[in-house]
Image (cartoon, grey):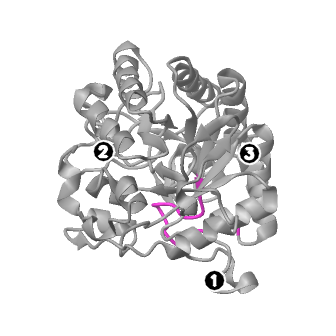
Amino acid sequence: MSILFTPFTLRGLTIPNRIAMAPMTRNFSPGGVPGADVAEYYRRRAQGGVGLIISEGTVVNRPEARNDQGIPFFHGKDALAGWQDVVDAVHGEGGLFAPQIWHTGLVREQFPDKPRPSTPEGPSGLFRPGEPYGQAMSQKDVIDTIAAFVESARAAAEMGCDAVELHGAHGYLIDQFFWSGTNQRSDEWGGPALPDRVKFAAEIVGAVREAIGETPLILRISQWNQQDYTRRLALTPTELEAWTRPLIDAGADMLHCSQRRFWEPEFPEIDGENGLNFAGWVKKLTGIPTMSVGSVGLSDDFFGAFKDQKTEANTDLTQLERRIEAGEFDMIAVGRALIANPDWVGKVREGRLAELSGYRTEMLQELA
């Protein structure tokens, strides 16, 4: 019996196994409204045995919150009706569902031929250090954006979602407030030290916590971002705890710690090349449950998703199992392997590893 298929309880929610579907942007919601094809896409992964399905990023009710017109809203009558169909489809297969609530902030459009129609917003009007883009948020913009996150999260709880995830990673809006390279504000939403720049995220977490009651709340964070893949927000365990502790105190039940390869140590200078990963260190320092992610079930990291190539399946999950058994982290999110194999969980559980397909970039062109 693999540790992967043992239950885990998060704030009273019993998740039947340790596997989550990682949030992956798909851009198949024209007008921001998910349709029947989106519901079927998630239903198939629930049918395949995923313990907790986390949706693609869904944006809050702010101007220019998304950087592609195919990204779904999580606000408005039509979009919420579409997500209700998704929730019902997942629940119909006995699955659990959490939307990822998002604001892309000052990240450029995904495709040059699909420019953002108006001016995006962010902490200081910077895409990266020294590269102006969009506009800096006013005090009112900041307060209204916090309220928009609450609006979407409350709607999720009211429609029966099993958990809510906030996207605070990868260089999008919440992460832009964390990073000194994009947050150069001199008011209470900025500051010279990382703990000074946590306030925006902590305010969102606290307000969402109050709005959704006992619904589990997950926050996704990352050391790296798409503006600088080598960036590290916390260079030491002390800095890592100072960054994450206020988020936990504000009400996060789990931190979803994103890294490119889950097996890579976060601080190898302390515990060696086989040391704790990002999620492992966060759990060690704070005691909070964590979810890891990064290239699970495939032979290279997620950058292969955007190249015209095929990535082979990796069927050796022994290191993953060892780390969960050791209590390093509590859950693992699986991304591209679940695009290629909707029944990945079932095949792993049944030992049918030889039947797993590799991932091909063209799979992003359809919702299957």
Quarter of the image holding residue 64?
top left
Q: How far apart, in angstroms, are the residues tagged by discs 1 and 2? A: 34 Å
- Tag 2 or tag 1, which sits nearer the N-term? 2
Query: Which residue in the structure is indicated by mark 3?
Result: 247
Q: Residue at x 80, y 56 (%)?
A: 286
Q: Does residue 75 appear anywhere in the picture? A: yes
Give the secondary structure at mark 3.
helix
Residue in view at x 35 percent, y 46 percent: 48
Residue 130 lies, with reference to residue 267, above or below; the image says above
Residue 138 point in image, percent of width and height:
61, 31
Magenta segment boundaries in residue numbering: 221-234
Q: Is residue 246 magenta?
A: no
Q: Nearer the viewer, residue 45 or 270?
A: 45
**Residue designated by label 2:** 26
- Distance from the alpha carbon under mark 3 to that under mark 1: 27 Å
Amino acid tagged 2: Arg
